[in-house]
Amino acid sequence: MKSILTLLLLLLISVTTAQVKILTWNVENLGKSKSDSTIQYIASVLKHYDVVALQEVVAGHGGAQAVAKLADELNRTGNKWDYAVSNPTESSSYKTERYAFLWKTAKVKRIGKAWLEKKYQLQIDREPYLATFEHNKKQFTLVNFHAITKSKQPETEIKYFKFFPENYPTLNLIFIGDFNCPQSHTVFNPLKKMGYLPVFTNQKTSLKKSCVEDNCLSNEFDNIWYPVNRVEATNPTAILFYKDFNDFNTAREITDHIPLAVTLQLK
């Protein structure tokens, strides 16, 4: 009986440690314009997760500095964090930006360097930023992405994602970020046919200009796409951070998108 309980305990520990908490957030012009209190607030949200993907870090030096300040703030929360910031994307000066990853070093380790995807940089305005992480001897690669705006037809960029699994056949790809496009759009059908599913369905993620009777969100833009044969997704969470603020306009000074989180079980 004792040996059976021991085995069950070991199994429970194994299942628990095989889980990674992932968060994605469009942080809207993260750079010099963000106050120390804003950085501290963002860190208070991120600290509960293991790997974070950020979009809309400003392309100038202030963007990289802001991510460094964010990592420093996270390191004050009781865990050691590391981070990677991309070079500015190969897009027009008006649209170029950086991406960032932050992660708890005790939970995951990065394998190699993160990289901006160059193959489709002429077809994709803000080319995705990829990084491979390892947890419990299992690896996954996050494809961090911020599409062009809805009016510019983001599906003209997203359609190239169907080639990524073929281009990276050994990587366990997870597409994450702000797609400026709902998961119901037909452009995602090729990924669905390959066994990918969105973590969120019918979840609006961008903030309205004003909030009326708790009707605060306007578009289903952000999401996480995962391969069901290699990953199990549980506990999807849309974090309504604006409820932490008495004034909706003050919340919008943080960013105009809510963060999305999920727990991944790597198979």
Image (spheres, rainbow, N blue to C red):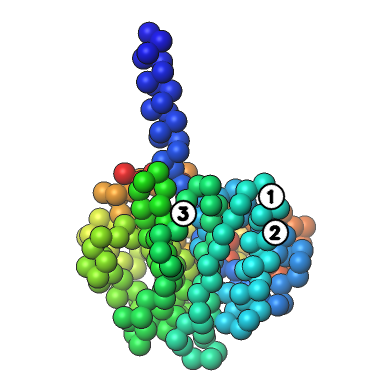
The crowd level at tag 2 (other Cα within 10 Å; few <14, some 14-19, many 20+) is some
Q: Alpha carbon of mark 2 to alpha carbon of mark 1: how far?
A: 7 Å
Asked if residue 21 shows in the view, the reply is no
Provide residue 56's location: percent of width, then percent of height.
56, 74
What secondary structure is marked by label 1?
A: helix
Q: Is residue 29 above or below residue 177?
A: below
Which residue does the numbered mark 2 point to in the structure image?
73
Residue closest to the far bottom: 93
Query: Dividing the picture into quarters, in which one does residue 39 lie?
Result: bottom right
In the displayed structure image, the side of residue 86 where residue 184 appears, left or right: left
Q: Return the residue nearer the eye: 253 or 76.
A: 76
Q: Residue 109 got which mark?
A: 3
Q: Is the residue under label 1 in contact with that under label 2 (CB below 8 Å)?
A: yes
In the displayed structure image, the side of residue 265 where residue 95 appears, left or right: right
Q: Count up the numbered dots.
A: 3
What amino acid is labelled 1 in the image? Thr
Q: Residue at x 38, y 27 (%)?
A: 11
Which residue does the numbered mark 1 point to in the structure image?
77
What amino acid is labelled 3 in the image? Lys
What amino acid is labelled 2 in the image? Glu
Q: Is residue 153 above or below residue 79?
A: below
Q: Residue 142 got which mark?
A: none
